[in-house]
Image (cartoon, rainbow, N blue to C red):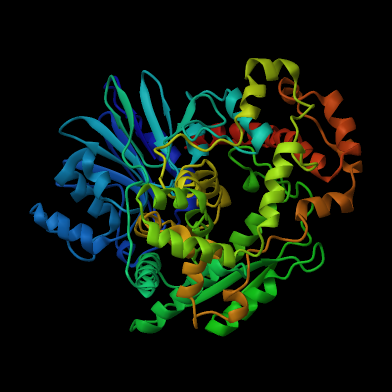
Amino acid sequence: MGICERKGSRVERALVHALTQFLAFRGPDGREVWTDGSVGFGHTMLRTTRESLMERQPANLEGKFWITADVRLDCRDELQKELEKEARKVPRAAPDSELILHAYAAWGEECVRHLRGDFAFAIWDTRRQILFCARDHFGAKPFYYAETPDFFLFSNTLNCVRLHPSVSDGLNDSALADFLLFGLNCDTATTTFRAIRRLPPAHCLTVSADELRVQRYWTAPTNGRIRYRHSDDYVEHFQILLQAAVADRMRADPVGILLSGGLDSGAIAATARELSSKTTGAVNLRAYTVVYESLIPDHDGSYARATAEFLGIPIQRIAFDDLRLFDRWDDPEHAWPEPVDDPLLAGLFDQFGTIAKDCRVVLSGDGSDNLMHFQMLPYARDLLRRHQWRRAIFEFPMYIRMRPSLVPGVRRRIKGVFARDASEAVFPRWLAPDFVRRTNLAERWKERNKLPTLPSHPVLPKGHASLDIPQWPHLFEHEDPGVTHCAVEVRNPFLDLRIAEYLLSLPPFPWFFEKMLLRQAMVGRLPEAVRLRPKTPLELDPLAARLNQQGTGWLDQVCWEGELSQYVSMSALLPLARRANAEQALSCMRPVCLNFWLQSSRRVRYNLHAEASNG
């Protein structure tokens, strides 16, 4: 965390101590503060890399630049070579925060264009009297801030910013509107609180006494184009990049793996096992899989176990069958900083609590589906536009032969034109009419399926645009220690810039058709049943199954928050929830989730103020 008094007054050191003390739960390895006139930084240390074993933060470089950072860098060797060209000698074992300081000293605010990895940091430049902040390309690390004419306050933990007594607790109607309609705030620059903002992924921020400037420093490329003569070259290049991405995230011991039983997480586990066996000091790998043993039919656990046994990795099953609706939502230790639309999310605390007993780092297979999203039509148009007739004549018939059937696709298009899907969500009738009018919810609803407005990729428009959807930072923020209260850092090898830029340069056919590239890369590395397994969602939604078991009688015991009436018409919600079908019942859970969150949020706010004043 950090605070900058914009009018030059001296920062209150006791306040910096109090805010830093609040962060102790996410950094058990050390706690330090630094203040100098109008600026103060605080840091609690969670050591997750070998280079961080002797690291101390806040850190400085020559007394000119001070940093507090939550960071794990990729491509360290390449960055150090670039710095050497700028006459900056950096020890090979320097922590990542020190590398960022040298990068800033060499390139100033352009340093972010040289950084790869997961990071959220702030640097105080004593010469220019500015604060420079940045968040990584995909938003793996959170960054929240509050700005007033008097001060600028930031943290990677939302509730830490709320702790400041001068930060308003007023709610953001637009964020709540998005939550009630879509289950999350679709604006990556705002939070549920009007006074608190978030720095979007791939953005940096500069603060001075009289100005705050936010700008984007990176957009996923659209002009990459890799075409090899031999098909094996595509697979080999991908394997090299995947090994590099996993290796950069395995600078820890032990390392956990979120093993779902599918191809993506299995590929990460297989790569991690190979890398571990090649090093002199083998990394202790452990797998964790979430299973349902009685609530719903679930075969993922058996596939995950088969993968773990094939690779020789011990696996622990974490059963979610006993979770009850809104379990532990009144527990301050499990209070969510922002509304969440899953009444069974107490399971996330159980999952991370189990992992935290063994590991501080866990690898995830998220990201592959988006980057390998298959689209044939844009690719076909690109071939014809470039007059690549030979390739088109060869690949079009191959694509038709590989498709299971043309009929399902035709049926979907006809159905989309002439009929309405019975399961399609409808505009909620339980929204308060005044709230609908003042937040223009009807228009928001019409826009719900539109992808971000970004430069269009000529071959992979949906895959390219999907990298910028709000679901990514939403996912990362809710797996962050600031939310889980567990000292576990999730790392996503597929969301590595090297892999993202490579995949956005490839021809989608045949490599993204049923994820052939990944399947080919895993030949002999995974059990065939897992390597060839199609994408398989759960047969039943666990929430729907639990709702079916518990019925709706529990609604009669809910204590409703008076503030909820500003957003929800209770007279419409309760009758609908009691007689709703499965689809409607899931939609009706969002107002209930908001109700519980409003209650817990107010309790947390009170406790935070008390802690700050005693700090």
- Residue 330 appears in the rendering: no
Left or right, 65 with respect to 278, comes to left
Q: As displayed, is residue 535 above or below residue 585? A: below
Quarter of the image where one finds residue 561? top right
Farthest-out residue, left? 87
The spot of residue 272 in percent (x, y) is 44, 74
Q: Is residue 13 left or right of residue 524?
A: left
Asked if residue 220 shows in the view, the reply is yes
User: Could you say which quadrant of the image residue 56 lies in?
Assistant: bottom left
353, 96: nearer the viewer: 96
* Up/down of 587 relative to 270, above or below: above
Left/right of residue 78 with respect to residue 351 in the rendered view: left
Q: Position of residue 370 (x, y in %)?
A: 51, 53
Which of the two residues, 262 or 402, is positioned nearer the viewer here?
A: 402
Q: Residue at x 23, y 45 (%)?
A: 111
Quadrant housing the N terminus? top left
Foreground of the two, 21 or 127: 127
What x and y, as percent, mark residue 393?
A: 45, 61
Question: Residue 463, relative to residue 417: is it above or below?
Answer: below
